[in-house]
Amino acid sequence: MNSKPRVALINPGKSQRFAVQEPLNLGFIAAVLEKDGISVKVFDQLSEENIRKEINSYKPDMVGITGTTPVIHDAYEIADFCRENKIFTVMGGVHPWIFPQEALEHADIVVRGEGEKAMLDIVNGRTKDQVIDAGYIENLDDIPLPSRHLMNMKRYMYCKKYAPYILHLPYVSSSKRIIHILTSRGCPHSKCIFCHNSFKQFPYRANSAEKVVEEIKLLKKDYDVEALYFVEDDFWTDKERVVKVSELLIKEGLNNIVWGTSARVEQILETEPDAFKLAKRAGCRSVTIGFESGSQKILDVLNKGYKLEDSRKAVKRVKEAGLLMHGNIILGAPGETIEDVELSKKFLKETSLVTPEIYVFTPYPGSNIWCRLEQENKVSKKYDWKRFNQEESIINLSNIPTNVLNRLRTQMYISYYLNNPKYAFALIFSMILHPKSVFDKIVKTILPFFKGFIKRRDQ
Ligand code: B12
Ligand code: SF4
């Protein structure tokens, strides 16, 4: 390998069931490498790039592949192909982080933790370790903005065209250019038993308000962005920063860009009404909260750390501020009963969120619940990882049979939309506008899912 290798960073995952969004984690790593004068390209299977073809034509000396659990099989397939072609292969991301030895069967080096500086060290030959514990970046302002110019931005900006069933962007129509942005990392709570933060345990860190607005300014200049979504776990943790970002957006005349955020219940309750008003003036249009359940018993099991009444108050706050409310619900938590599911259904009916997303409880490797199950010898390491997709129950810890759980999820969506016909019409309308995307989803994700489901039932 020469002194400055050509590097390809790869986002695996063929299924658009997972939405179409720029791989910002690779964007950050690419930016750090580019700053050091290294040639980098980013390839993304999620945006339907043919990775083998791209690799054959770019001929990198080194690849860096990211991997979450449900797409790790795609990541390993790409890694094997790269190694067959004598390309030095590095892997990172949440799944290799937890299973470095499994990943080392496919890669030369595994990075655990935030990989920007570690990847730079590997590329520059400063480390020979097979497993690198990279830790976390203390000051996010120290790293450059993600290299979006290496990505197929047209694809991501019109993500609602490719995936009209994306529900957490109710404030964006499919003709608008939307860009995702990540300006903080970590969560001060870090205790929910299913969450990646329960194993990372990294402190909450955020870019300064100035850096956030610098990035948005650039996105306006380079892509004429019309809408943003802050993908971080909780945009509202640092209230002073929310206020400052909002003030700067207004001052810079960038408040014609609309944006959505994620939040935790506690943070919404601690935010002053004036801060919401200001954020709305600055373009904020929606808040997404992981409510998870309408049953206090389940909130306690999940270790959410607040009362059900707080969830209701948070919805009220968001709505009073004139913002759209999107929320996530989890079905099938440990010990969950049909009565608990009924309470979640009731919660959805009472609160009437604009759009709910209903997931099936999935104990991801590394999470607090996974570690508990591991200690009790209740999990193996030989799962079909692609089934860890939050849509089917792979390890059912609830008191509800799996087929009933799946049925309840569908029924919950149907009953929600029957109660909220205007949201149902909006969804159907956006799907009618993009029939090809809907057809693709059925062929690529729903049919294989049902085929797999029927096969497993037959076994
Ligand atoms: C944005 C996002 C998405 C986007 C984009 C994902 C993508 N792959 O590009 C979309 C909407 C597509 C998505 C989909 C899904 N997601 Co998601 N997503 C996130 C989210 C909110 C932010 C990701 C991010 O950018 N983080 C910030 C960066 C800095 O952290 P990072 O991703 O860990 O990357 C750092 C290190 O891991 C390391 N690293 C990562 N890759 C590599 C590669 C190399 C070579 C090196 C050296 C280092 C390295 O360095 C990076 C930079 O510091 C995270 C939660 C979170 N806050 O992290 C969940 C998260 C990654 N998602 C998760 C899940 C479960 C899903 C879905 C299954 C949900 C679903 N049912 O649809 C799908 C899976 C699809 C997929 N392709 O992975 C889980 C993964 C759990 C697991 N063990 O796999 C997470 C952790 C949230 C959670 N539930 O706990 N997701
Ligand atoms: S689910 Fe949300 S509140 Fe809970 S640890 Fe994860 S990011 Fe924090």
Image (tube, grey):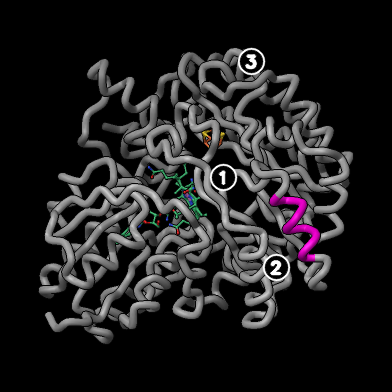
Kind of residue at disc 3: Gln
- The reply to whether discs 2 and 3 touch (Cβ–Cβ < 8 Å) is no
Is 289 above or below relative to 9? above
Question: Mark 3 against mark 1, which lies toward the viewer?
Answer: 1
Label ID, residue 174: 2
Label ID, residue 233: 1
Residue matched to label 3 = 296
Is 457 above or below relative to 105? above
Region in magenta: 241-249
Would you call the spot at circle 2 few (<14 residues within 10 Å), some (14-19), or many (20 or more)? Answer: some
Left or right of 109, for residue 423: right
Quote the CA–CA distance across marks 3 and 1.
22 Å
Residue for point 17% across, 58% down = 109
Residue for point 45% across, 31% down = 194
Lower sequence index among marks 3 and 1: 1
The residue carrying mark 1 has its beta carbon less than 8 Å from ligand 2: yes
Residue for point 12% across, 60% down = 128
Quote the CA–CA distance across marks 2 and 3.
37 Å
Count every numbered label the image shows and give the total: 3
The residue carrying mark 3 has its beta carbon less than 8 Å from ligand 2: no
